[in-house]
Image: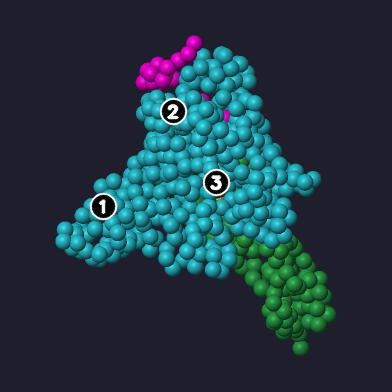
Chain colours: A green, B cyan
Amino acid sequence: MIVMATTKRIVLHFPKRLADRAIVYHLVKDFDLQFNILKASITPEEEGLMVLELTGKQADYDKGIQYLTETGVRIQSLGQNVLRNEERCTQCGVCITLCPTGAFELERPARRVVFQDEKCLACGLCIKACPPRAMELHF
Amino acid sequence: MAKTVAEINEKIKAGKAVVVTAEEIIEIAREKGTKKAAQEIDVVTTGTFGPMCSSGAYFNIGHSKPKIKLGGGKTYLNDVPAYAAFAAVDLFLGANALPDDDPRNRNHPGEFNYGGGHVIEELVAGKDIRLIATAYGTDCYPRKRLATWINIKDLNEAVLFNMRNAYQNYNVAINGSNKTIYTYLGILKPNLGNANFCSAGQLSPLLNDPYYKTIGIGTKIFLGGGTGLIAWQGTQHDPAGLRTPSGVPKRGAGTLAVIGDLKQMSPKWLVGTSMLGYGVTLTVGVGIPIPILSEEILQYTTVTDADILAPVIDYSDAYPQRKPDILAEVSYAELKSGQIKIQSKKVPTASLSSYPKAVEIANTLKQWILSGQFLLTEPVAPLPGVESGISFKPLNERPIEE
Ligand code: SF4
Ligand code: SF4
């Protein structure tokens, strides 16, 4: 029997109390999944944020995801896309220091705020933090 | 070589006025010297675009048939309560008003997705607004309920009236506690994690005329994309506060109350704004022309970000508890570098006020003047200055014994 391996990219949101290392360790040891941490960061609420590429058998992957959910990790698929509504953006720049991945950059000397969506993890932080609500979640 | 406003207006009408922005004047004065620059330049334009909470608008909606007296009753615009405490069909809507059923901060931090500021933006954009009113009914105004769409083009008057805008300078907010806080100056991360400021700095109107020598009551201005007037000094006007030796305020200082016809304004320059965990407000565009009447007045307009200092205040403690403590004084040049140093910690900075939009306002006003469509005005009365003795007093609480 040939078992197809699956590779998926997911965004994990950890509550403060969980240590990311321990979780990744369980995924490897108990579910036989290979992982690749693409990005790890901490939000202002000190919630852990990690983008993970998981590879393994579909059944193991499903069990791994179930384990994560039960532990209190919120899982978000990377299929979500955060876009900027250019008309609503006032170029204030308050998102720059909030984005955990540095997806907003200030273009000097004009001080225009450039959004580099390739750096965006779709963590959703800027959506409620943007005063005119220019950042939008698309599915 | 002193010029007068009337002389400058003659040049504007003849298409001969020289107009530059408060950003451009810095280089020009550096190259030519202030004396020559003052002879050549007639007007310096300023601009600012940031959230300004003490903003609002009043309307007269016209009489229904039969008539209703909204005053003393309850009125909602898109579910946001408007202040109905005047005659039959006059209303005032404040930028910070929230629908009665908004959860506010019950689930902290509240989202504050929609409120007075957003209604003002949609009204200005020409969208229909849902008006629901209840009244008590009188012999002359028998009606007790009203539910109707209204549109700005049908209103008798729609007037933006902001009791405090364009703060001369402003605090830099930081968080010294160990948890995230949500303020009107944005989200502040724990342990001095970030610092937010809110001023256009060298482009900001009152920083270019620090002693209110040309800007006064009656001055015609750019307001929300249309023209408006300075109606009065703004609330909390505090001209006598700390200043640098060259006169630049180091604290909030002066403010303006402004008024203008909402019908000619634009949603581009009046933007409904949501501050997470704090509330709703309105981001307002204000631009003020400064007539260069003398070398001294020109000198003031050459102020740069490096000359303007702002106090860094802990919004987890000093600000809410009304303590006088400040953590540091930093210049806008430092703030705009993206990083300041507080207690030997490097703190990333961000702005709530949009510099690119402030530049656009100053340039728009410059174009209006160059094209002859906007003439300057002489103030009808000065704003209270340093000598006025006016200061921003705290509340003297006197407990009421039951
Ligand atoms: S916070 Fe919003 S409006 Fe401000 S620069 Fe960022 S995306 Fe634009
Ligand atoms: S959703 Fe916003 S805050 Fe989160 S990574 Fe993308 S741009 Fe940054």
- Going from N to C along the chain, the mark reached first, 2 or 1, is 1
Figure quadrant of residue A42: bottom right
In depth, the one of B366 and B328 nearer the eye is B328
Residue at horizontal 38%, vertical 63%?
B79
Looking at the rendered structure, the secondary structure element under dot 1 is loop
Residue B178: x and y in percent read 72, 60
Instruction: State the residue at coordinates (47%, 64%).
Output: B402
Q: Are labels 3 and 1 assigned to the same chain?
A: yes
Residue B225: percent from left, percent from top = 42, 40
Q: Nearer the viewer, residue B346 or B344?
A: B344
Q: Which residue is mark 1?
A: B87
Q: Is residue B21 rendered magenta in the image?
A: yes
Which amino acid is tagged 3?
Pro
Viewer can see residue B125: no
Q: Residue B147 shows which numbered tag?
A: none
Question: Which comes sooner in the sequence, label 3 or label 1?
Answer: 1
Query: What's the magenta region?
Result: B1-23
Image x and y of residue B300, in percent: 57, 24
Q: Is residue A75 in view?
A: yes
Of callouts 2 and 3, the N-terminal one: 2
Q: Which residue is mark 2?
A: B382
- Disc 2 or disc 3, which is closer to the eye? 3
Disc 3: which residue: B394
Mark 2–mark 1 distance (CA, rounded to whole Å): 32 Å
| Local SS, label 3 | loop
Q: Amino acid at mark 1?
A: Ala
